[in-house]
Amino acid sequence: MTKKINSKLTKLIKYYSLINYNLIYDSNAINRYKKDSFKLTGNKADQLQKLKNLLKNIKNCSLKKSATNLVFSDGNPSSKIMLIGEGPGANEDKEGLPFVGRAGQLLDKMLLSIKLDRKNVYITNVVNYRPPENRKPTDLEIARYLPFLTKHIDIINPKILVLLGSTALNTIIGNELVISKARGKWIKKKIGNCSTEVIASFHPAFLMRQPDQKKMSWIDLKMIRKKIKELKIKIDK
Ligand code: URA
């Protein structure tokens, strides 16, 4: 009898680990209609810190096991412009910051071309630990990190959300879209409690491999610049 209960319990624990039990395990009754699977209280800074702690303490994640550092975000949390990449590479893993390697240097130049820099935007990734060998995160890994990403967007509450590359595009918009077709179009989207204008564009790492696509990327950057003006977003100098 005890053996049976123990085995049931082990299975339940395994299941909870698999589905991120730390997000849903709660002594309160479950409200199945609530959109928000996290209850992060406090001001923006508190909530970001709590989200970061949840990610630091994520259990049974092979990405975390093979990574050196959590790569949470960079930039200005008050910014109304949020950028989402795919996942950290070797440099990002070492420094614990997104887009600090070669792709990051190109991203800085892209931002500069529309008179922005890192202090004017907020940057994160679909997954917050480096996938080994710089491979793409798997669907399962993306699904595991999606509630964190959704909450991250919810907390930052951007007016403009820029999806860099197909992983960010398919994570946020879905439908197995092809980046070359889906880029350069504004989509209004509600993510958590945040209503935002979303645009996808090429990932800087892709642009390094396909520099002829930089002209398309420039079109997208100009669209972002225009939207900033339209929405009267203040850029801190
Ligand atoms: N590529 C990404 O998608 N994110 C990073 O942080 C670095 C490279």
Image (cartoon, helix red, strand yellow):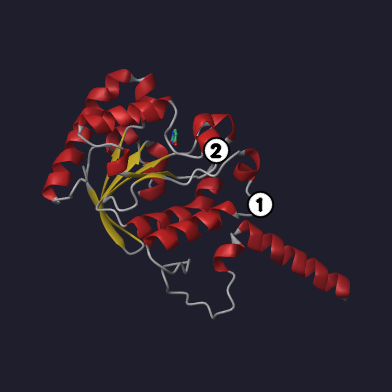
Q: Does 28 sit above or below residue 146?
A: below
Residue 183, position in %: x, y? 27, 37
Image label count:
2
Task: Tell me which residue sits at (65%, 43%) in the image.
Answer: 65
Q: Nearer the viewer, residue 46 or 16?
A: 46
Query: Sequence order check: which comes first, mark 1 or mark 2?
Result: 1
Q: Is residue 94 visible to us here?
A: yes
Q: Secondary structure at mark 2?
A: loop
Residue 20, position in %: x, y? 59, 59
Task: Tell me which residue sits at (47%, 77%) in the image.
Answer: 31
Residue behind mark 2: 130
Quadrant assignment, res 204: top left
Q: Amino acid at mark 2?
A: Arg
Residue situated furthest front in the rendering = 237
Residue 199, position in %: x, y? 26, 43
Q: Secondary structure at mark 1?
A: loop
- In this rendering, would 68 be left or right of 156? right
Residue 227, position in %: x, y? 16, 45
Quadrant assignment, res 54: bottom right
* Neighbour tally class for label 1: few under 14, some 14-19, many 20 plus, Cα within 10 Å: few
Q: Amino acid at mark 1?
A: Asn
Check whether the beta carbons of the residues at disc 1 and disc 2 lie within 8 A of each other.
Answer: no
Q: Does 161 sit above or below residue 209?
A: below
Location of ligand 1 given as a quarter of the image? top left
Give the distance between the C-alpha atoms of the residues marked 1 and 2, in whole angstroms: 15 Å
* Neighbour tally class for label 2: few under 14, some 14-19, many 20 plus, Cα within 10 Å: many
Q: Nearer the viewer, residue 43 or 9?
A: 43
Residue 60's tag is 1
